[in-house]
């Protein structure tokens, strides 16, 4: 029973990392109909930025600050850098191709992802080697149960807080409502007076911040990061968004959790399952694309003639 519980918790944790990356894809696609394939690389860049900031803090008196202050300081640094990177992604990798065929911005973001990951590998100290992520969460657990370790609870709690904030922002703020309006009908949103340019720009800043937090959770979950991990997390996040419905935030959650549960339970229940868990997850993605191309919670589009 305890092993089964551990697998459920592990699946939730992995699903949380996929979910936040998938939400980044959904936000970007919602306002521009563009798949920003460097989203996973932005998340891993954020994780490495946090590790770099921690290395600097560790050599100064700031390391004596309370742990909560250190974590918040690291998150602020990472979020600011990823927000800037998200903005630059839009300005230099997508905006110049707004009137070009859809394939052009897609290829541009793929190329940018390569630049980001190679930049991390080149400029981070020993960046091409696997890097241990700082153990910022205290060791220990509730009731001595490893499934309820402080790290696990922290990852789940942060994900829930981020989702609550995001849903509140989208439903209660003018900018959030504008983002949803553009995602539903870009032309109608423009006719109602919504500033498309500023809304799209803000979306990429917000997406960069969310991906930064995703990178933090990925590092906390895995414990070790590679500079090129963004490519795989990008593929997994995009797959989760497609399975759930590319324009749906709820769909991104459903898709991320589904992929997380598939990978964990295939790894745990089948002999040598870890070696092909990702392959099984991608097979499920392909099945969904064939059977329900709009996704679990996506809306079916009807072409009018």
Image (tube, grey):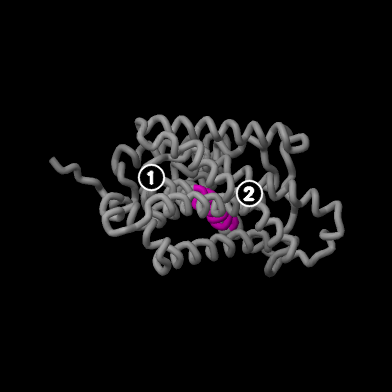
Q: Main secondary structure of the magenta part?
A: helix
> In the figure, residue 229 lies in which quadrant?
top right
Q: Nearer the viewer, residue 268 or 206?
A: 206
Q: Can see residue 297?
A: no
Q: Point out the stretch of residues depicted in magenta.
A: 6-21
Residue under label 1 = 32
Q: Is residue 304 left or right of residue 183?
A: left
Is residue 12 on the magenta stretch? Answer: yes
Q: x, y percentage for residue 235?
A: 49, 38
Q: Which mark is residue 81?
A: 2
> How many residues crowd mark 2 within 10 Å: few (<14), some (14–19), many (20+)?
many
Report the Cα–Cα distance between label 2 and label 1: 22 Å
Is residue 54 on the magenta stretch? Answer: no
Q: Nearer the viewer, residue 71 or 296?
A: 71
Q: x, y percentage for residue 141?
A: 70, 65
Residue at 62 percent across and 63 percent down: it is 153
Q: Which mark is residue 134?
A: none
């Amino acid at each position: 029973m305890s092993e089964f519980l551990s697998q459920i918790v592990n699946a939730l944790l992995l699903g949380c990392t996929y979910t936040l990356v998938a939400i980044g894809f959904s936000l970007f696609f919602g306002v521009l109909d563009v798949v920003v394939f460097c989203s996973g690389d932005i998340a891993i860049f954020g994780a490495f930025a946090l590790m770099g900031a921690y290395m600097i803090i560790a050599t100064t008196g700031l390391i004596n600050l309370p742990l909560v202050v250190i974590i918040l300081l690291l998150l602020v640094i990472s979020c600011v850098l990823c927000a800037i990177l998200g903005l630059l992604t839009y300005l230099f990798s997508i905006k110049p191709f707004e009137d070009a065929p859809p394939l052009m911005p897609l290829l541009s973001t793929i190329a940018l992802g390569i630049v980001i990951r190679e930049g991390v590998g080149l400029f981070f100290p020993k960046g091409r080697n696997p890097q241990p992520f700082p153990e910022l969460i205290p060791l220990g657990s509730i009731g001595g149960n490893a499934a309820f370790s402080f790290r696990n609870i922290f990852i789940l709690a942060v994900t829930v807080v981020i989702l609550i904030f995001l849903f509140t922002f989208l439903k209660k703020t003018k900018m959030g409502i504008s983002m949803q309006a553009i995602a539903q009908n870009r032309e109608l949103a423009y006719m109602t007076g919504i500033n498309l340019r500023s809304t799209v720009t803000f979306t990429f800043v917000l997406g960069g911040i969310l991906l930064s937090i995703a990178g933090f959770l990925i590092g906390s979950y895995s414990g070790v990061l590679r500079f090129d991990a963004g490519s795989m997390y990008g593929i997994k996040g995009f797959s989760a968004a497609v399975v759930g419905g590319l324009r749906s935030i709820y769909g991104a959650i459903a898709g991320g959790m589904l992929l997380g549960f598939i990978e964990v339970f295939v790894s745990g229940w089948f002999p040598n399952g870890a070696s092909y868990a990702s392959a099984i997850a991608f097979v499920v993605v392909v099945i969904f694309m064939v059977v329900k191309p709009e996704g679990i919670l996506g809306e079916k589009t009807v072409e009018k003639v």
